[in-house]
Image: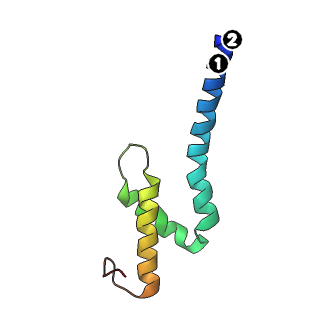
Amino acid sequence: MIAAVVALLVLLLLFVELVSAIAPILIIVTLVPREDRPALAGLLAQVDSSRRRLHLWPALRAATVRRRDLLSGRSPGGPRR
């Protein structure tokens, strides 16, 4: 019984790790236009250049804000509504 519980926990951990590794890639491939991917890759590299786990969500939020600024014609970091 205990072996089955441990096996299920290990499988759950592996599944969660796989999903957390694949989900950001799928989001970028499906939601970011092809022509914007190199710029996003550069932004991600600048935001988190350490060897720690990539903090993707803050970087994506920063990229979204930057893109909205560019599309709206505001200067980066300009006044918000």
Viewed as shown, does residue 66 lie left or right of 14?
A: left
* On-image quarter of the C terminus: bottom left
Q: Amino acid at mark 2?
A: Met
The residue to which callout 2 is attached is: 1
Viewed as shown, does residue 18 lie left or right of 53?
A: right
The residue to which callout 1 is attached is: 5
C-alpha distance separating marks 1 and 2: 6 Å
Q: Amino acid at mark 1?
A: Val
43 in relation to 25, above or below: below
Question: Whole-percent x and y of residue 11?
Answer: 65, 28
At 31% across and 81% down in the image, what residue appears?
78
Are there few (<14), some (14-19), or many (20+) residues within 10 Å of tag 2? few
Res 35 → quadrant: bottom right
At 54% across and 67% down in the image, what residue appears?
37
Question: Whole-percent x and y of residue 72?
Answer: 44, 86
Question: Whole-percent x and y of residue 77?
Answer: 31, 76
Q: Nearer the viewer, residue 61 or 2?
A: 2
Residue 48 at least partly seen: yes
* On-image quarter of the N terminus: top right
Q: Nearer the viewer, residue 47 or 81?
A: 81
